[in-house]
C-alpha cells in the first residue's frame, strides 16, 4: 500500500478525470466517490482511469462519506463534487444548496471525524469558484476581493468556501480552497458554453446542423485548460500551510470572442446568421466580467497556465470534429 492515497468526490466530472490521471501518474492510490444507482458515467471512469477504486456515496449523505473515508483511508481529499451548472441552480436552488453548499460541510465533517486526534493529517481541497465574485468588486479579482455571488450556485460556493476556512481555523485542519476561474477541455459537459459552441461549430462545419441558439453574448470569462488547473489543486495540498488561491489565466474574452475563435477555426468568419439569440439561455442575474489575478499562485505554488485561449478553443473544436465525423 502506497502512503499517498487520494479520495476524490466528483470523480465522474471533467476535473475528476484529469485529477485522477495526474495523481495516478504521481504514484498515488486513487479512490473516487460515485453516486446513484447504476451511474451512467461509471463506465467512462472505468475506461479512462481503470486503476481508480470506486466507493458508493453521496455528498448529502454523511454516513456514506464516513464509510468511503474508512474504506479509502486517504491522506488527501479533493472535494470536486457539486451541482455545477450555474443556469440550473436557479430552478433547483434547494438541491444546489444541499449538494454544493451543505455537501462541503459533510465532507469536512467526515474528514475531521476520520482523522481523529490529528485533524491536519488528512489534507483537504475545496473546489471554490470565481462565481463567488459575481458582481465583481475588483478588476481583476484576487483572494481578498469581496465576494458577491449572483446565483444559488455562487451562494452555495461561498458557504463552502467560508466553511473550509472555518474548519482550518477552528480545528487546525490542512484545508485549502482553490478559487478556480472557468476551465475547459474536450471533456467539458455539453451544457457549458465552450463545449456547446465547439460541438455546434463542428456540426455546422460538417453540414450536420445549421444554427446554434445562445444566450448573453456580452459576458466575459477568464478561460483556461482543465489539465493545468488540476495541477494547481495538487500543488496547494503539497504546501506546509493550507491557504486559498486564485487560479486563472489573467485574460478575459467575451462569448462573442469565443464564437469568433471557434467558427474561425473551421474557416467561417461571418457567423452572425448562424447564431440565434434565445431568451431561454439568458440568466436571471448575470456575472458580466471575470478576470483573475493568479499572482499569489505563481509566487507560492510556482503555478502558471500553459494553454492559451485560441489553443484551448482549437483543441475543443478539433476534438468535436473528430467525434462528429465518427458519428456521420
Ligand atoms: P462537473 O459538473 O463536470 O462534475 C461534477 C461532479 O459532481 C460529477 O462527478 C457529479 O457526479 C458530482 N456530483 C453531483 N452531485 C453529487 C452528489 N450529490 N454527490 C456526489 N457527487 C455529486 O464539474 P467540474 O469537473 O467542471 O468541476 C469540478 C468542481 O469544481 C465542481 O465543484 C465545480 O463546481 C467546481 N468548479 C468548476 C470550474 C470549472 O470551470 N470547471 C471552475 C470553478 C469551480 P454525477 O456524474 O453522478 O452527476
Ligand atoms: P459559468 O459557465 O456559468 O461561467 O460556470 P457557462 O459556460 O455555463 O457560462 C459562461 C457564460 O456564457 C454565457 N452564455 C451561455 N452559457 C451557456 N451555458 N449556454 C448558452 O447558451 C450561453 N449563452 C451565453 C452565460 O450566460 C455565462 O455568462 C462555470 C461552471 O463550470 C461553474 O461550475 C464554475 O464554478 C464556473 O464556470 C467558474
Image (cartoon, rainbow, N blue to C red):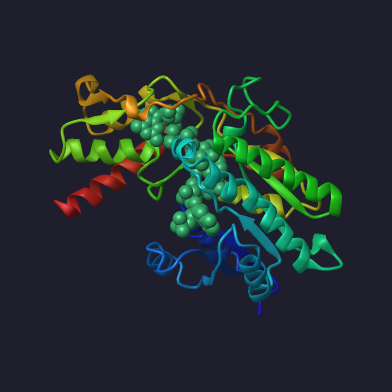
For image coordinates 24% across by 50% down, the residue present is 322
Ligand 2: quadrant of the figure: top left
> For residue 272, which quarter of the picture?
top left
Residue at point 67%, 58% (across, down): 107
Q: Give the percent coordinates (x, y) of residue 36.
A: 46, 64
Q: Position of residue 112 (x, y in %)?
A: 77, 61
From the viewer's perspective, is residue 150 above or below residue 89? above
- Image quarter of the N terminus: bottom right
Q: Is residue 18 rendered to the left or right of residue 244?
A: left
Nearer to us in this view, 267 or 193: 193
Q: Quadrant of residue 263?
A: top left
Tell me residue 256's x, y (percent).
36, 22
Q: In the rendered image, is residue 306 in sight?
A: no
All told, the count of numbered labels is 0
Q: Quadrant of residue 115?
A: bottom right
Residue 121 in the figure: left or right of residue 202? right
Task: Residue 210 in the image: state x and y as whole percent.
Answer: 16, 32
- 66 horizontally vs 256: left or right: right
**Relative height, residue 207 to residue 256 (above, below):** below
Residue located farthest toward the front when viewing the structure as drawn: 94
Q: 238 or 104, which lies in front?
A: 104
Instruction: Give the residue drawn at x 79%, y 50%.
Output: 167
Residue 165 visible to the viewer: yes
Amino acid at each position: 500500500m502506497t502512503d499517498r492515497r487520494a479520495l476524490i468526490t466528483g470523480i465522474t466530472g471533467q476535473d475528476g478525470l484529469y485529477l485522477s490521471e495526474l495523481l495516478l501518474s504521481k504514484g498515488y492510490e486513487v479512490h473516487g466517490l460515485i453516486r446513484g444507482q447504476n451511474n451512467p458515467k461509471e463506465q467512462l471512469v472505468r475506461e479512462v482511469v481503470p486503476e481508480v477504486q470506486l466507493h458508493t456515496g453521496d455528498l448529502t449523505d454523511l454516513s456514506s462519506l464516513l464509510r468511503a473515508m474508512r474504506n479509502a483511508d486517504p491522506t488527501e481529499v479533493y472535494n470536486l463534487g457539486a451541482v455545477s451548472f450555474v443556469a440550473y441552480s436557479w430552478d433547483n436552488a434547494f438541491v444546489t444548496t444541499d449538494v454544493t453548499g451543505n455537501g462541503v460541510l459533510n465532507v469536512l465533517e467526515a474528514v475531521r471525524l476520520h482523522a481523529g486526534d490529528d485533524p491536519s493529517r488528512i489534507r483537504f481541497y475545496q473546489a471554490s469558484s470565481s462565481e463567488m465574485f459575481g458582481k465583481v468588486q475588483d478588476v481583476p479579482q484576487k483572494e481578498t476581493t469581496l465576494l458577491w455571488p449572483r446565483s444559488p450556485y455562487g451562494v452555495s460556493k461561498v458557504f463552502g468556501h467560508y466553511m473550509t476556512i472555518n474548519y482550518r481555523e477552528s480545528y487546525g485542519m490542512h484545508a485549502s480552497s482553490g478559487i478556480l476561474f472557468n476551465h475547459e477541455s474536450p471533456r467539458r459537459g455539453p451544457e457549458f458554453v465552450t463545449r456547446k459552441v465547439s460541438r455546434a461549430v463542428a456540426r455546422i462545419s460538417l453540414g450536420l446542423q445549421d444554427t446554434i441558439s445562445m444566450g448573453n453574448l456580452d459576458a466575459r470569462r477568464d478561460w483556461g485548460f482543465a489539465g493545468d488547473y488540476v495541477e494547481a489543486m495538487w500543488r496547494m495540498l503539497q504546501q506546509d500551510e493550507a491557504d486559498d488561491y486564485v487560479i486563472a489565466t489573467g485574460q478575459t474574452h467575451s462569448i462573442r470572442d469565443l464564437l469568433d475563435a471557434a467558427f474561425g477555426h473551421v474557416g467561417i468568419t461571418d457567423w452572425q446568421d448562424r447564431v440565434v439569440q434565445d431568451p431561454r439561455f439568458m440568466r436571471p442575474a448575470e456575472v458580466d466580467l471575470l478576470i483573475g489575478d493568479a499572482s499569489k499562485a505563481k509566487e507560492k505554488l510556482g503555478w502558471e497556465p500553459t494553454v492559451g485561449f485560441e489553443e484551448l478553443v482549437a483543441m475543443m473544436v478539433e476534438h468535436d470534429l473528430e467525434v462528429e465525423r465518427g458519428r456521420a
